[in-house]
């Protein structure tokens, strides 16, 4: 098999990049293969890894470089970015222990986030149920005892407001934790890339 076969496989795996980005990447690696005098498919794999590994690394690099600022990124975007970086780390055999360590950290993080979400849901459910019950009770007794009815209505509205506030706080906590996860995993990825490139030059 030739280096053309290698690049064709590589191109087919670059899902998510625009046509211009794909062209730039292919042009870069075509020149790299020529400059490094990689004569066939096996030589390209020995130097660059399999097309699959190179594609994962490339997609991770583009995702990091072109991702939204962390402060504006959505939780879904941050979770996707973390997953792409983990796949890129798994693409390099020497990074597999690091990727496993990162996954273990993420599992711990997911457990913490899950516990926070569960606690927040219980608080929200409790406040909403108590607030709804107090509001209904207040309306029911409003005409029998105006002051008591107003009191219960006020308690009910406060409970409903507290439930909504707790829901928003829970969302913000999860969002911040995901943002912190992205910052940490980007740092790990950049450190690994710098060390890998330094080792390749030595």
Image (cartoon, grey):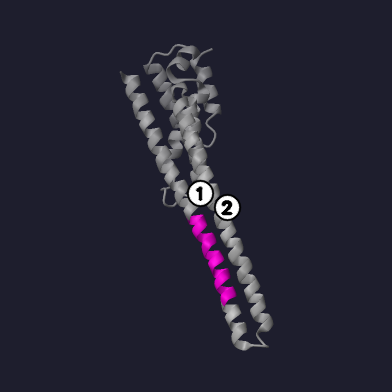
Name the residue located 56 percent from the left edge and 65 percent from the top edge: 163
Name the residue located 40 percent from the left edge and 22 percent from the top edge: 31
Give percent across and percent down for residue 9. 55, 23
Find the distance from the CA under tag 2 to the CA under tag 1: 17 Å
Residue 111 image label: none
Give percent across and percent down for residue 165. 52, 64
- For label 1, the SS is helix
- For label 2, the SS is helix
Look at the numbered discs 2 and 1 and tell me whether their residues touch, using CB distance below 8 Å. Answer: no
Residue linked to disc 2:
118
N-terminal label among 2 and 1? 1
> As displayed, is residue 100 above or below residue 145?
above
> As displayed, is residue 21 above or below residue 48?
below
Which segment did they paint magenta? Answer: 155-172
Name the residue located 50 percent from the left edge and 25 percent from the top edge: 53
Residue linked to disc 1:
75
User: Residue 99 in magenta?
Assistant: no
Q: Main secondary structure of the magenta part?
A: helix
> As displayed, is residue 110 above or below residue 117?
above
Q: Nearer the viewer, residue 181 or 1?
A: 181
Query: Where the N terminus falls, by quadrant?
Result: top right
Query: Where the C terminus falls, by quadrant?
Result: top left
Give percent across and percent down for residue 26. 46, 27
Q: Residues within 10 Å of mark 2 (few under 14, many from 20)?
A: few
Q: How many marks?
A: 2
Q: Nearer the viewer, residue 89 or 3?
A: 89
């Amino acid at each position: 098999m030739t280096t053309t076969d290698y690049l064709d496989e590589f191109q087919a795996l670059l899902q998510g990049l625009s046509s211009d980005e794909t062209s730039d990447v292919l042009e870069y690696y075509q020149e790299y293969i020529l400059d490094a005098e990689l004569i066939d498919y096996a030589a390209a794999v020995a130097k660059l890894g399999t097309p699959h590994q190179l594609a994962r690394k490339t997609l991770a690099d583009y995702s990091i470089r072109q991702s939204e600022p962390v402060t504006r990124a959505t939780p879904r975007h941050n979770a996707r970015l973390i997953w792409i970086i983990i796949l890129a780390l798994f693409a390099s055999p020497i990074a597999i222990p690091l990727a496993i360590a990162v996954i273990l950290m993420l599992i711990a993080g997911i457990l913490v986030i899950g516990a926070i979400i569960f606690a927040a849901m219980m608080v929200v459910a409790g406040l909403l149920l108590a607030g709804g019950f107090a509001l209904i009770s207040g309306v029911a007794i409003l005409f029998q005892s105006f002051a008591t009815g107003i009191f219960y209505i006020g308690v009910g509205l406060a409970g409903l407001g507290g439930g909504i506030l707790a829901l928003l706080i829970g969302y913000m906590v999860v969002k911040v934790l995901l943002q912190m996860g992205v910052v940490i995993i980007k740092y790990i990825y950049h450190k690994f890339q710098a060390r890998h490139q330094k080792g390749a030059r030595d």
